[in-house]
Image (spheres, grey):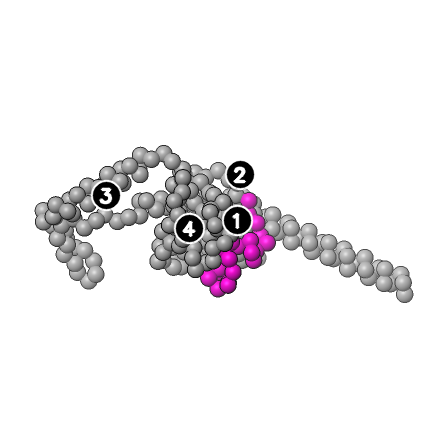
Amino acid sequence: MKKLLKTTFLLSFLILFMNCGKKIDEEEFEKNVLTEVFPKIVDSICVDSRKMDPPPKFGIETWKNGNIIKVDTSKATNKERIAYHNWKKEQKRVDNDTSKIIIGFDQYLLNFGERRVNIESKLLNSNFSNFKFDYSKIKLNNKFKIKNITEFPKAEKLLLAHKVLLYEQKYNFVFSGFLEILRIKFDKNKKGGVLEASFAYCGRCGSGYRIYIKEINGKWIIEKMEDTWIS
């Protein structure tokens, strides 16, 4: 009887050990894929929020079915001309600025389909996620630079409803917005997958996406992107 119990215990331990090893392997595989597609996602959805301000009104606008079909710039007022001149000047300054554009990012990722707005918790995903994605060694293609959200002032203390306050603070760097990425949901053969991502800026504006990825000749690419929300 003791021999049977010992054998059963050993088998249970081996099964548990094998399952833990499999889980670790699956997580490492997912992190490797995320590392490969991360720069592509940043390039695809992140923006310099300073470039998102639309030009001010300049002249008499003619609208039809909710769209501007004609602008008579000869009727622009002096006030409009000054505002438009200042807007163009600022856009040129931004274009010539060589500073890195800082993107806030929480490296603790939620599962596919989860939403932070449905969770009565603090801002950081580390409060309810164990999946930590290390982005620190990833080289981005553009002027963007990722900054851990924990490095933002008061980030630990702010609730989701007050996230807008992070945008209203003064920083000694060019802050553009927050990137959020959810974990990948792979197909059965792990040759394709889908994940969700979003980029929010100014506290009230942003867009969400469903991103389909695929492995081709050993490399992971973005196959297709779908808009899921916009504000």
Q: Mark 1 or 2, which is nearer the eye?
A: 1
Query: Residue at the location (47% across, 55% down)?
Result: 158
Q: Are marks 4 and 3 in contact (CB under 8 Å)?
A: no
Mark 1 residue type: Gln
Picture disc at residue 150: none
Which element is circle 1 on? loop
> What's the CA distance linking mark 2 and mark 3?
37 Å
Q: Mark 2 or 3, which is nearer the eye?
A: 3
Depth order, front residue of 37/90: 90
Which element is circle 4 on? helix
Relative horizontal placement of residue 97, taking residue 66 as reference (left or right): right
Which element is circle 2 on? loop
The residue carrying pointer 2 sits among few (fewer than 14), some (14 to 19) or many (20 or more) residues within 10 Å by Cα, namely few
Q: Are marks 2 and 3 in contact (CB under 8 Å)?
A: no
Mark 3 residue type: Trp
Q: What residue is pinned by disc 2?
A: 137
Query: Residue at the location (51% across, 40% down)?
Result: 138
Q: Which residues are magenta?
A: 114-134
Q: What residue is pinned by disc 4?
A: 166
Q: Mark 4 or 1, which is nearer the eye?
A: 4
Relative horizontal placement of residue 94, taking residue 142 as reference (left or right): left
Query: Residue at the location (84% across, 59% down)?
Result: 7
Query: Residue 9: image x %, image y %?
Result: 81, 60
Picture disc at residue 107: 1
Mark 4 residue type: Leu
